[in-house]
């Protein structure tokens, strides 16, 4: 049974491997990181922190953009190429098809993140900046969770609206999620009952990628987070992924093609 | 399995839209295709052919009526296990090689790796793409992609083949090759159901023809039977399937 999902997932992974766009993004990122790493020649104290901050932010943002675009365009592209008809003519259930697509997008996102990692590690050869590899591993794990969450959200949006609208909306939600955690804490105290209800609703509806972001810890060389935090973050991620994918399936299950 | 018809369509109605935009694409269509038959499904543009075929595949749902394939509900996994389908136009993943595309479709059909390894080169040769297995599909012409489409449709040697607009996008050589593939499948007693605008193709390949117009069946007869009717000068409807077709369609359009 898993073979069918894997076959669908593999097409997305192969596409990610063979399309030039991802490598272009990686090259641009590499250029930016190289510039950041060259700054060490001025021998400024703590400059490696600047390198870490820039590179982790750039890597995170580029991965997020890639995942959103990749996830949002999966189904519209299948309709455009009409491959949806030949694929669903085979004995594969629609949930298997969706799950395969989702797994493929997550794998492609991780591949993209892996490429950025390579660039990051190359940059570190120049800067020789200290890095806690355990914390860095945790950072990557949390990024994987963020990828899973955003891929599911973009998938759902692509079921509800056109490709361009889905991409823009997913990016807006991502940006909103980025500032929400801090903004809500401040705003909550100054708002009335109705406002608080809106904030609480938003809190449960919109995933907050800031909660998955350990880049500040990596930059400032703080200690790694305890395992239970990673466990809670995984649950938090599943709290969004499961309903998003469930809703996507509900919309797709009986959809006329 | 039992003695079920390969295709059983009963009082099929398909409606699109709502309110003033409501449009009846198929109106009470009933027909059967027996195992081993080759049936052509013809009609002018907008007659309801593609809607009917999409319903057979489970891509669309009947507003009323039932559609069963080998006794199974259309679109069910059990039904799809026994079908090979080729849509009118289909572009395959441009970033994949022909071999990889066939591995994907064969794998979805449940074929194991060893079978695929053996069958893919044979299939590519059969559809005129010998030695092209390692070429990315972005380098294939539309006709070559359609050949890949034929290969994916027959990869698991299905009991029933459903082609929407047979030979669409193929050049004369491609059409000839496809006809050869279909004749061979026909000799092996496979059921073939296809829509086409090429009446010569229908005439030369089919045991039976179902003609629809305005979502309704206007003819359903074996090709020799139709030819007999023509020879008998039935209503002056001409001497070929094409003329018979025109004889049925034109008066309906005039009315």
Image (cartoon, coloured by chain):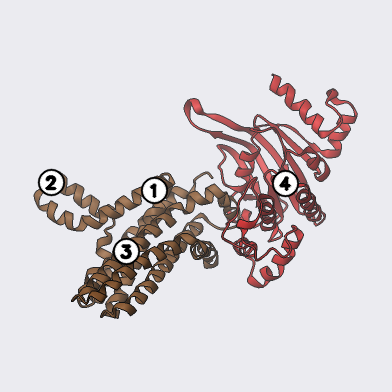
Chain colours: A brown, B red
SS class, disc 4: loop
- Marks 3 and 1 belong to one chain: yes
Q: CA distance from mark 1 to mark 4?
A: 36 Å
Which numbered disc covers residue A79? none
In depth, the one of A76 and A33 nearer the eye is A33
Secondary structure found at label 3 = helix
Residue B119 placement: quadrant: bottom right
Q: Which residue was labeled with disc 2?
A: A193
Q: Nearer the viewer, mark 3 or mark 4?
A: 3
Residue B167's label in the rendered image is 4
- Disc 2 is placed on an element classified as helix
Q: Nearer the viewer, mark 3 or mark 2?
A: 3
Relative side of B242 to A46, left or right:
right
| N-term mark: 3 or 1 | 3
Give the chain letter at badge 4: B
Residue B236, given in percent of the width and then of the height, sits at 85, 23
- Viewer can see residue A2: yes
Q: Residues within 10 Å of mark 4 (few under 14, many from 20)?
A: many
- The residues bearing labels 3 and 4 have C-alpha atoms spaced at a distance of 50 Å
Task: Work out how far the residue at label 3 is from the one at label 2, CA to CA, in angstroms.
Answer: 38 Å
Q: Position of residue B244 (x, y in %)?
A: 80, 30
User: Which chain letter matches label 3?
Assistant: A
Q: Measuring 77% from the left and 31% from the top, which residue is drawn there?
A: B245
Q: Are marks 2 and 4 in contact (CB under 8 Å)?
A: no
User: SS class of the residue under badge 1?
Assistant: helix
**Which residue lies under the disc numbered 3?**
A58
């Amino acid at each position: 049974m898993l073979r069918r999902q894997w076959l669908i997932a593999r097409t997305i992974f192969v596409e990610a491997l063979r399309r030039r766009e991802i490598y272009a993004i990686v090259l641009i990122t590499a250029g930016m990181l190289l510039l950041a790493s060259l700054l060490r020649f001025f021998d400024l104290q703590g400059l490696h922190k600047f390198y870490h901050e820039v590179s982790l932010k750039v890597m995170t943002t580029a991965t997020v953009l890639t995942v959103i675009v990749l996830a949002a365009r999966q189904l519209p592209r299948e309709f455009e190429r009409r491959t949806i008809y030949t694929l669903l003519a085979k004995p594969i259930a629609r949930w298997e098809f969706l799950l395969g697509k989702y797994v493929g997008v997550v794998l492609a996102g991780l591949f993209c993140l892996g490429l950025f990692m390579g660039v990051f590690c190359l940059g570190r050869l120049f800067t020789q900046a200290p890095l806690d590899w355990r914390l860095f591993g945790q950072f990557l794990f949390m990024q994987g969770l963020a990828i899973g969450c955003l891929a599911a959200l973009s998938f759902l949006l692509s079921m509800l609206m056109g490709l361009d609208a889905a991409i823009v909306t997913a990016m807006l939600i991502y940006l909103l999620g980025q500032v929400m955690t801090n903004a809500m804490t401040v705003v909550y105290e100054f708002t009335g009952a109705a406002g608080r209800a809106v904030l609480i609703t938003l809190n449960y509806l919109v995933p907050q990628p800031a909660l998955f972001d350990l880049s500040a810890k990596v930059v400032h060389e703080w200690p790694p987070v305890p395992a239970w935090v990673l466990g809670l973050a995984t649950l938090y991620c599943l709290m969004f992924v499961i309903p998003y994918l469930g809703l996507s399936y509900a919309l797709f299950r009986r959809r006329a093609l | 399995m039992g003695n079920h018809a390969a295709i059983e369509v009963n009082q099929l109605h398909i409606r699109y839209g709502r309110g003033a935009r409501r449009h009846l694409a198929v109106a009470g269509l009933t027909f059967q295709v027996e195992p081993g038959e080759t049936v052509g499904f013809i009609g002018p543009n907008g007659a309801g052919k593609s809607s009917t075929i999409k319903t057979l595949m489970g891509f669309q749902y009947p507003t009323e009526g039932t559609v069963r394939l080998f006794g199974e509900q259309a679109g069910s996994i059990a039904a799809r296990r026994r079908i090979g389908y080729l849509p009118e136009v289909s572009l395959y993943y441009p970033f994949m090689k022909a071999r990889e595309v066939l591995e994907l479709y064969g794998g979805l059909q449940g074929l194991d790796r060893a079978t695929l390894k053996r069958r893919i080169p044979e299939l590519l040769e059969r559809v005129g793409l010998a030695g092209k297995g390692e070429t990315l599909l972005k380098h294939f012409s539309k006709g070559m992609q359609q050949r890949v489409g034929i290969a994916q449709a027959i990869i698991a040697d299905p009991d029933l083949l459903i082609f929407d607009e047979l030979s669409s996008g193929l050049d004369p050589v491609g059409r000839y090759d496809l006809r050869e593939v279909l004749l061979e499948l026909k000799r092996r007693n496979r059921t073939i159901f296809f829509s086409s605008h090429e009446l010569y193709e229908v005439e030369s390949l089919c045991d039976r023809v179902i003609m629809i117009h305005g979502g309704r069946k206007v003819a359903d007869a074996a090709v020799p039977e139709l030819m007999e009717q023509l020879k008998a000068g039935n209503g002056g409807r001409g001497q070929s399937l094409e003329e018979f077709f025109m004889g049925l369609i034109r008066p309906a359009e005039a009315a």
